[in-house]
Image (tube, coloured by chain):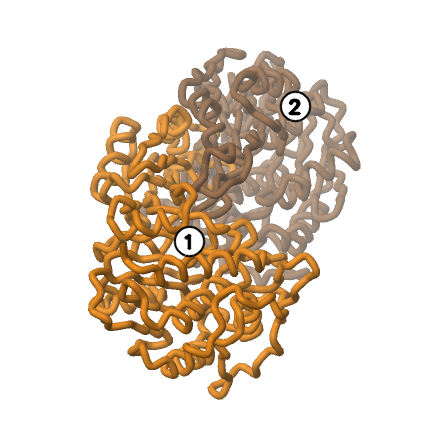
Chain colours: A orange, B brown
Amino acid sequence: MPDTTPAPGSGTPSGPAAAPAPGPAAALDLTLDGPALTAALVDFPSVSGTEKPLADAIEQALRALPHLTVDRHGNNVIARTHLGRAERVVLAGHIDTVPIADNVPSRLDDDGVLWGCGTSDMKSGVAVQLRIAATVPEPNRDLTFIFYDNEEVAGHLNGLGHVADAHPDWLAADFAILLEPTTGEVEGGCQGTLRVHLRTRGERAHSARGWMGSNAIHSAAPILARLASYEPRRPVIDGLEFREGLNAVGIEGGVATNVIPDACTVVVNYRYAPDLSPEQAEAHVREVFADCGVDEFVVDDHTGGALPGLSHPAAAAFMAAVGGIAKPKFGWTDVSRFSALGVPAVNYGPGDPLYAHKRDEHVVVERIVHCERRLYDWLSARPR
Amino acid sequence: MPDTTPAPGSGTPSGPAAAPAPGPAAALDLTLDGPALTAALVDFPSVSGTEKPLADAIEQALRALPHLTVDRHGNNVIARTHLGRAERVVLAGHIDTVPIADNVPSRLDDDGVLWGCGTSDMKSGVAVQLRIAATVPEPNRDLTFIFYDNEEVAGHLNGLGHVADAHPDWLAADFAILLEPTTGEVEGGCQGTLRVHLRTRGERAHSARGWMGSNAIHSAAPILARLASYEPRRPVIDGLEFREGLNAVGIEGGVATNVIPDACTVVVNYRYAPDLSPEQAEAHVREVFADCGVDEFVVDDHTGGALPGLSHPAAAAFMAAVGGIAKPKFGWTDVSRFSALGVPAVNYGPGDPLYAHKRDEHVVVERIVHCERRLYDWLSARPR
């Protein structure tokens, strides 16, 4: 019932609603304001792997909105407008949380801070998605709302990835916004991450007769020296300065305290700016360690980065509407999945990433209102 | 009954005797020749910690020899002559073995090789001790026979160490021979061994924002570089060339694959020649790594070496009697315990150290006969 829904921010935060009993029958009330809807979502537990009741409730609430078509794949819910607009924008968010740590139900304090598991990462963002879905029946750009599961666990379980594989057409768009916690700032693109195991080999011997063997840990000396002297790049892309890093995140070697070790493994993590393709990134790391005596180079994990894409017209218009200056995203996020589909994407949400996954997770409710208002204004304005 | 005992080597190896049922009642027959007695000892299991029945049998056999006084401390048996000779010589051996690996009972093959757990390390040596005890009732030097337990396990359990602590007077002597496997060559002295943990410290950060932390693994680069370029000494002591070694035997660092590690530990083993005291050895290692950014230097384990002592008259006479050229012992052995008591000591035994602790452990029976003969001749000869 979008026409009876109050405009965003028109009420004062009313405090957490009573938690619905999670289950197939639990309903979401999209007439609540953003902060109250956030509280209702936090009080509806959905730890990774247990999202079905919440996905059911979201699907039910969206199906009640006549301007949207709704699709579902597993516990992923996709709702779209079909107004024939010149551009299509995605608003995406994951509905799962990390495990609850004695921080549910939510609690609103006197300073306008809402506490609880998922307040920041990212039920406040999901609340904004639902509010926009309910309050902007005739957006100036066609909209795609994506609510997906299993973002907080292993990448192969990620619901957005499953939808991208099974129904890539559902994700087709000119621009995507993930409402991940960014304290209301726009974070563009994300860096890629490559993890390799660099192994050196030696020959075992008793350490009392070390000259009869060959020490694989000593052979790793050039690898560590190279890491210690490496100068990471800081390239500027679309006006954003990225910062790369090449780091040992693990080292292991040794057989017994009286044995010359025959193997040593250095685990290296390369975080690279999105102007490098995954192939270029791997080639770079191979080159860095080319003359360091590496006997085995094993790629353990690799996911490419995502260009900020801020020069795209839809992105530029969004930046103009929300104001402020975009920042680069150093960590890897799901914007990379959109990037891989050719959709420029940014993170922009009301939560605070510093408190994500923490027992004292919280969100400033004013930011929820602010974020919703910015998106509402941008998507409601008459195209110039 | 020493006077009825055949002289060493007077019989052909008769093959393994039927294994006695190990237990308090099992008896050792010291009239068997060296190889047969070795087989009987191998067939009398005495894995470290289970030596009591064998210690009982050895004590019982020695108490039957009227020229010896017998003492016991735990499962350690000490037998001595008291003839008022000018010199006293120790013949020592441990009676325990590493765990049996489907290699008991013993087996004598057609090539005169006896196979089985402990054949080499060191029941062939123990058999020679027992044969000398039985066949040399009036040695030209007073003799001390030591049979001790728990040599193959942690140092603090070692029976020789317990006797040295409780009854140092029982070990008083001018010279000691440990019948450890040396393939019939004399090995003089032993190197010391020092193990230290070198720790570097850093500061954790997410690897996507590595510049916010400090990488402890990278900080270990100078330590590995120093190890890789270290030139060990080869000092000549008492005519024996020792070979030192400074090796990493372990390295460990890493918190998670996306975290800059805040700690790294390199475990270093220094094997040093016995011209250095333990204090000098530790000072040397501290100096080697003085400018390598080590945040913590922890001595994990340290046992000093033993000088060869081959210039002592008893040692020189022994060398002349057994012939050949002494070799240095690179590994740490119990000769160091005698050295600490002021008793020069060497290793000299029929076993082959290359096969110690192995499933295919064996001894060439001719070497048992040879070793027994050499000791018999040296200890029976009229003093010149």
Image quarter (top left, top right, bottom left or bottom right) of the N terminus of chain B: top right
| Rendered position, B30 above or below A213 | below
Q: Position of residue B190 (x, y in %)?
A: 55, 24
What's the mark number on residue A348?
A: 1
Q: Position of residue A337 (x, y in %)?
A: 29, 57
Name the outermost residue toward the bottom.
A25
Q: Residue at x 37, y 38 (%)?
A: A262
Amino acid on which disc 1 is placed = Tyr
What's the mark number on residue B314?
A: none
> What residue sits right under mark 2 in the picture?
B339
Viewer-side label of 2, 1? 1
Image quarter (top left, top right, bottom left or bottom right) of the C terminus of chain B: top right
How many numbered marks appear?
2
| Rendered position, A272 above or below B378 | below
Q: Position of residue B270 (x, y in %)?
A: 53, 25
A329 or B334: nearer the eye? A329
Q: Residue at x 57, y 68 (%)?
A: A11
